[in-house]
Amino acid sequence: MKINSVRQPTDFFVEIETLVIEYNINYLDAILLYVEKHNLEVESVATLVKKHPIIKSKLQKDCEGLRLVEKTARLPI
Protein backbone atom coordinates (compact mmCIF):
# COMPACT_ATOMS: atom_id res chain seq x y z
CA MET A 1 0.00 0.00 0.00
CA LYS A 2 1.35 3.40 -0.96
CA ILE A 3 0.74 6.12 1.59
CA ASN A 4 0.68 9.67 0.31
CA SER A 5 1.98 12.64 2.23
CA VAL A 6 -0.94 14.09 4.14
CA ARG A 7 -1.12 17.57 5.58
CA GLN A 8 -4.81 18.02 6.46
CA PRO A 9 -6.24 16.47 9.66
CA THR A 10 -9.19 14.96 7.75
CA ASP A 11 -6.93 13.33 5.16
CA PHE A 12 -4.64 12.10 7.91
CA PHE A 13 -7.65 10.55 9.66
CA VAL A 14 -8.65 8.71 6.47
CA GLU A 15 -5.11 7.36 6.03
CA ILE A 16 -4.96 6.16 9.65
CA GLU A 17 -8.40 4.54 9.40
CA THR A 18 -7.27 2.76 6.24
CA LEU A 19 -4.19 1.41 8.01
CA VAL A 20 -6.26 0.25 11.00
CA ILE A 21 -8.68 -1.66 8.78
CA GLU A 22 -6.15 -2.98 6.26
CA TYR A 23 -3.58 -4.26 8.76
CA ASN A 24 -6.00 -4.98 11.63
CA ILE A 25 -3.94 -2.90 14.07
CA ASN A 26 -4.79 -0.33 16.74
CA TYR A 27 -4.58 3.43 16.25
CA LEU A 28 -1.28 3.82 18.07
CA ASP A 29 0.38 1.25 15.80
CA ALA A 30 -1.23 2.80 12.72
CA ILE A 31 0.17 6.23 13.58
CA LEU A 32 3.61 4.75 14.23
CA LEU A 33 3.45 2.88 10.91
CA TYR A 34 2.45 6.10 9.13
CA VAL A 35 5.36 7.96 10.74
CA GLU A 36 7.81 5.20 9.85
CA LYS A 37 6.72 4.99 6.20
CA HIS A 38 7.02 8.76 5.78
CA ASN A 39 10.29 9.08 7.71
CA LEU A 40 8.68 11.62 10.05
CA GLU A 41 9.14 12.40 13.70
CA VAL A 42 6.25 11.43 15.96
CA GLU A 43 6.03 15.04 17.13
CA SER A 44 5.31 16.17 13.57
CA VAL A 45 2.03 14.25 13.43
CA ALA A 46 1.04 15.20 16.97
CA THR A 47 -0.53 18.40 15.66
CA LEU A 48 -2.63 16.41 13.19
CA VAL A 49 -3.85 14.13 15.98
CA LYS A 50 -4.66 17.11 18.20
CA LYS A 51 -6.68 18.77 15.43
CA HIS A 52 -8.94 15.77 14.82
CA PRO A 53 -11.13 14.94 17.85
CA ILE A 54 -12.24 11.52 16.59
CA ILE A 55 -8.77 10.13 16.06
CA LYS A 56 -7.65 11.74 19.32
CA SER A 57 -10.40 9.96 21.26
CA LYS A 58 -9.76 6.62 19.52
CA LEU A 59 -6.05 6.90 20.28
CA GLN A 60 -6.86 7.75 23.90
CA LYS A 61 -9.09 4.67 24.18
CA ASP A 62 -6.41 2.41 22.66
CA CYS A 63 -3.76 3.76 25.02
CA GLU A 64 -6.06 3.23 27.99
CA GLY A 65 -6.63 -0.35 26.89
CA LEU A 66 -2.87 -0.88 26.66
CA ARG A 67 -2.50 0.75 30.10
CA LEU A 68 -0.20 3.44 28.73
CA VAL A 69 -2.34 6.20 30.25
CA GLU A 70 -4.81 6.28 33.11
CA LYS A 71 -8.44 5.74 32.22
CA THR A 72 -10.56 8.84 32.01
CA ALA A 73 -14.08 9.08 33.36
CA ARG A 74 -16.74 8.42 30.72
CA LEU A 75 -20.45 9.01 30.81
CA PRO A 76 -22.59 5.91 30.22
CA ILE A 77 -24.29 5.91 26.84
Image (cartoon, rainbow, N blue to C red):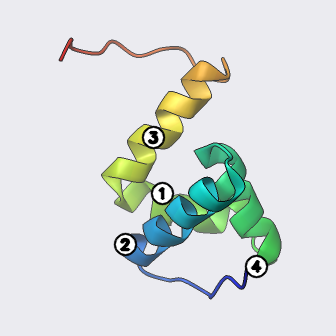
CA distance for labels 4 and 2: 17 Å
Disc 4 versus disc 1: distance between alpha carbons? Answer: 16 Å
* Spatial CA span between label 4 and label 3: 22 Å
Badge 2 amino acid: Thr
Secondary structure at badge 3 equals helix
Left or right of 49 in this view: 45: right
Q: Which residue is mark 3?
A: 58
| Quarter holding residue 66 | top right
* Dots 4, 1 in contact, CB < 8 A: no
User: Dot 4: within a 10 Å radius of its alpha carbon, few (fewer than 14), some, or many (20 or more) residues?
Assistant: few
The answer to whether mark 3 and mark 1 are in CB contact below 8 A is no
Q: Nearer the viewer, mark 1 or mark 2?
A: 2
Give the numbered dot on residue 25: none
* Residue type, numbered disc 3: Lys
Amino acid at circle 4: His
Q: Residue 45 at what x, y percent from top left?
A: 59, 65
Label 2: state its secondary structure: helix
Residues at discs 4 and 2 in contact (Cβ within 8 Å): no
Q: Residue at x 43, y 46 (%)?
A: 56
- Secondary structure beneath dot 4 equals loop
Q: Quadrant of the N terminus?
A: bottom right
Residue 10 appears at what percent x and percent y? Answer: 37, 72
Q: Are marks 4 and 3 in contact (CB under 8 Å)?
A: no
Query: Residue tagged by mark 1?
Result: 49
Q: Which numbered circle lies on residue 38?
A: 4
Q: Residue furthest left?
A: 77
Q: Is residue 27 above or below residue 40?
A: above
Residue under label 2, please give it.
Answer: 10
Q: Earlier in the sequence, mark 4 or mark 1?
A: 4
